[in-house]
């Protein structure tokens, strides 16, 4: 049987943004209970692929290499909780055009390379609490500004305490802040 990897493309925050997001996650967790996302696991999923044959990872890297990204500002300024999947999250009030373009490019390149992926509409958010006891929230927060310069390919391994993530590819202008 061929080995596979569970993978997705994401924005991966630098230390200062990760710390601010984790602080917001602790506040949501105190209010909604559930399972707080570990600081090291905080990210924004751009495109979820699921299981991909390890022999096809090079083709996935090549598809990502064709995506262009210019630095842009992502302002995370609202919080909410989705009752259908019990996820508390933060996100932008309006998705920046540069982020929409990045997702569209990724979808096109990955599709052209013949990969299956989750095609539901993109909803810009960072999951901070899972299994939350969702209820109406004061959705305004102290804005978190994230300067995005690159995107990553992440390998996910399921474990008893959640998922363990490893960045296995990075494209763009360098570290994110």
Image (tube, grey):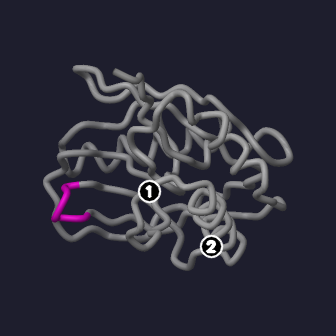
User: For the residue labelled by badge 1, is the local secondary structure a helix, a strand or a loop?
Assistant: loop
Residue wearing tag 1:
117
The quadrant holding residue 107 is bottom right
Per the picture, the main secondary structure of the magenta-coloured stretch is loop
Residue 81 image point, x, y percent: 27, 63
Determine which of the numbered discs, if any, sits on residue 35 in the image.
Answer: none
Measured in 3D between alpha carbons, the distance from the residue under mark 2 to the one under mark 1, in whole angstroms, is 17 Å
Residue wearing tag 2:
100
User: Looking at the image, is 154 positioned above or below residue 44?
Assistant: above
Magenta segment, which residues? 82-86
- Point out the image quarter for the C terminus: top right
The quadrant holding residue 19 is top right
Q: Which residue is pictured at 27% across the width and 68% down the height?
A: 137
Q: Residues within 10 Å of mark 2 (few under 14, many from 20)?
A: some
Camera-nearest residue between 96 and 134 = 96
Q: Residue furthest front?
A: 1
- Point out the image quarter for the N terminus: top left
Q: Which residue is pictured at 36% across the width and 41% down the height?
A: 26
Magenta stretch holds residue 85: yes
Camera-nearest residue between 13 and 166 = 166
Q: Judge from the rendering whether residue 62 lies leftward or rightward of residue 133; answer left or right.
A: right
């Amino acid at each position: 049987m061929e080995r596979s990897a569970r993978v997705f493309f994401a924005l991966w925050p630098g230390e200062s943004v990760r710390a601010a997001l984790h602080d917001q996650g602790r506040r949501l967790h105190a209010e909604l209970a559930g399972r707080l996302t570990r600081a090291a696991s905080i990210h924004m999923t751009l495109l979820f692929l699921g299981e991909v044959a390890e022999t096809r990872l090079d083709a996935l890297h090549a598809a990502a290499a064709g995506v262009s990204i210019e630095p842009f500002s992502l302002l995370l300024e609202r919080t909410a909780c989705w009752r259908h999947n019990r996820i508390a999250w933060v996100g932008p009030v309006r998705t920046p055009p540069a982020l929409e373009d990045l997702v569209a490019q990724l979808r096109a390149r990955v599709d052209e390379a013949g990969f299956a992926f989750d095609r539901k509409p993109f909803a810009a958010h960072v999951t901070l609490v899972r299994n939350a006891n969702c209820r109406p929230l004061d959705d305004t927060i102290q804005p978190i500004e994230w300067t995005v310069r690159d995107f990553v390919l992440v390998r996910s391994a399921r474990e008893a305490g959640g998922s363990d993530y490893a960045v296995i590819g990075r494209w763009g202008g360098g570290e994110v802040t």
